[in-house]
Amino acid sequence: MTLDDVLARRRVVMPGMRLAYREPLRIVSGEGVWLTDAGGDRYLDAYNNVAHVGHGRPEVVEAIARQAAVLNTNTRYLVDGVVAYAERIARLLPDPLEVVWFANSGSEANDLAWRIARTVTEREGMIVTRNAYHGSTHLTMATSPEELGHDRLPPWVATIGPPVAGSEPGVEAAVARLAAAGHLPAALACDTVFSSDGIFEPPAGWLAAAAGEVRTAGGLFVADEVQAGFGRVGPRLWGFAGHGVVPDIVTLGKPMGNGHPLAAVVTTRRIADAFRADGYYFSTFAGNPVAAAAGMAVLDVMEGDGLPARASRVGALLHRELAGRHPSIREVRGPGSFVGVDLGTGRLAQEVMEGMRARRVLVGRTGGGGEVLKIRPPLVFGEEHAGLLLAAFDGALGDQTSGSGSSSSV
Amino acid sequence: MTLDDVLARRRVVMPGMRLAYREPLRIVSGEGVWLTDAGGDRYLDAYNNVAHVGHGRPEVVEAIARQAAVLNTNTRYLVDGVVAYAERIARLLPDPLEVVWFANSGSEANDLAWRIARTVTEREGMIVTRNAYHGSTHLTMATSPEELGHDRLPPWVATIGPPVAGSEPGVEAAVARLAAAGHLPAALACDTVFSSDGIFEPPAGWLAAAAGEVRTAGGLFVADEVQAGFGRVGPRLWGFAGHGVVPDIVTLGKPMGNGHPLAAVVTTRRIADAFRADGYYFSTFAGNPVAAAAGMAVLDVMEGDGLPARASRVGALLHRELAGRHPSIREVRGPGSFVGVDLGTGRLAQEVMEGMRARRVLVGRTGGGGEVLKIRPPLVFGEEHAGLLLAAFDGALGDQTSGSGSSSSV
């Protein structure tokens, strides 16, 4: 079967879902930081944060296989491993965050978090960052200007930011705009590393100030850790850690099960009790024992291999090597191994991304104009891989800035 | 660890999520139609439709383990097995249903289906059945009077039914009620076996008439096959099959991956094109190759073991044996192995369910007043298991109707 055959057949699957790259990748296997395509070519994966502890990581595969053979069921029954995993997640978060709901995706986790915030505050308004993306359910899409577009945001959504250095959060002004539309804020919800806004670590004091402002206005502070969480911003486990604030609700997702569908909402006893008094949530699949086993294995590997520290070390190397490497680089941003390279224009970022793909290194791009290269590798990415990435980056950027303009040479 | 210890520890997990039974079950393993608890007692599972081809089914476990070791990634890349699985799903549904979106849960699938219907019709109104349950996202919960309560339904939701024999669908009247609230119908969405309404197979002509009425009013007909689909109503594969109607959108879930999180929305090319022009959907986990491998293995086993025919045969046996078995039985309803036993009162159904649990047979209950025993076993349930179920039913019902009232004797 040729690539064209697969593309033709793919017409029946997920229409409208963009494939990565002009010439899509037909992937057949993965191992560690490597993906292999149907032609046998290997690609260095510097983009897929979901394969957190590495593609096909044996400990996680083994945990999934073992538990799937023994038992997979739902949370209407007690299963010790599920309780133990929830306790472990709660222990990784600061007090008073102690109650865990499981979900099957970041979208579901955020949808539930928004529902909890709205139920316990008895309000509808949501404040998000300017180019936020929080999920593809009806409710989370309504708070995702990145994909929905600003002109289609409902009147109960107000935006703030982006949180560039020296800026004020601007939550008070957003509260005023909501009030003008007849709404009170249920919550400020934001990534703790502003991903789709262009990969910004919040400036010192920004998150605490933003949380304080929304709480003063009677709303909750929801930290979306779906991308930033689980050590990517190492050595810290969480994007909000070290920012002087404990969120009211934290949502977790992507890397949590190393690709096995698994996500969670973590909140306080007080908020959980207020929600359960008036809100309903059940999910047939969420919190199943196989997902819990996958999640437990991910944490074991993360701790055993010291991956948050590695994310810090390798990320620092990438920062150091990229900053000032080329006149086209406007800025290198982001904590740990969550690295944004602002190339100024979406066109240039697109061509560099394609040029790196031609050199068999996978990165993405983001930001309001798609102008920021997004380097977000599995946490097992090491110094030796960083060297390969930098060489591909140099080649791809050189193609674009040396006058040839070709992105297809290797 | 004692049951009390687990219950105390469970305070951190999924608060407000009801556990099954007064004395919750602490399950440690499953095999075929059997679940085993921490004390080593085996329970006959006549309730969990998710373990469609049997708990711990080796072919499915093997498929998951094999694919997880080779590759798990997202739909931004082409993966042949995902395309092949989508094609197979599309082939199982009648033309012109041919386009498949994957999701991670029935809630996500319904949320997306509602979004598609609303986007392509440019309308907001939804019509559902009186005691419907369609999911726990914000949007699907708004159309789930079973859990939300009728007094909290938004003005863009109108209800019909229940579809008892001889009744009219009443869609036109629901359209009129929506119009009075300022809304036009985007869709009628309903189970094709009305589950939470009390397990009713739609009377002959009901589904076609209902679909005709909503289409005349400019809306779509969405068939929620999350519970009924994949051969439970055997020998048919789908609840709507044989009812003289092809839905505009079909949603699939629970049994699809035998417990692995997997769900889907299937629709026509025309509707898919209209949605993609204006709507966005992406899911990191949905359509991953491991889920596709699980789904493919489920279909292989279903076909290899002739499970839809077995569901028909065993279901017919249960119907035959239950109908008129005891004066407390008002009616035995439902197609295939989706059997409802109307016991008239929620109290009696509750006590019989608990009494059967004491005899180590698991069933559920449903209906507006919880008055209907819900027998919905894995499809590998056989005649020998039906005999065990009937004996437990007789014992539990006898306890309640012989004057002793005890539900704990075995």
Image (cartoon, coloured by chain):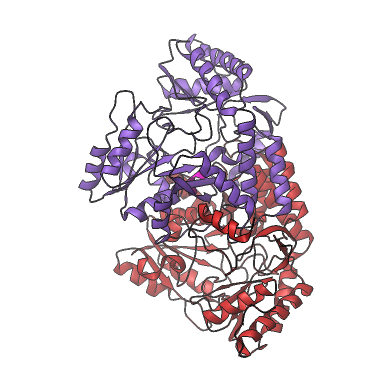
Chain colours: A red, B purple
Q: Nearer the viewer, residue B55 or B298?
A: B298
What percent of the width, then of the height, locates residue B273? 41, 57
Residue drawn at x 53%, y 80% is A347
Q: Residue at x 58, y 75 (%)?
A: A201
Image quarter of residue A94: bottom right
Q: Is residue B108 magenta?
A: yes
Q: Quadrant of the C terminus of chain A?
A: bottom right
In this view, the residue in front, A321 or A5, is: A5
The percent coordinates of residue A277 (x first, y second) are 44, 45
Residue that appears at 29% across and 42% down: B214
Tell me what residue is drawn at x 73 percent, y 74 percent.
A314
Above or below, A83 against A393 in this view is above
Image location (x, y in percent) of residue A81: 69, 43
Position of residue A230 relative to residue A336, above or below, is above
In x, y percent, where is residue A335? 64, 74
Asked if residue B96 can be seen in this view, the reply is yes
Range of magenta residues: B105-109
**Horizontal side, residue A200 vs residue A379: left or right:** left
Location of residue B25 (image quadrant): top right
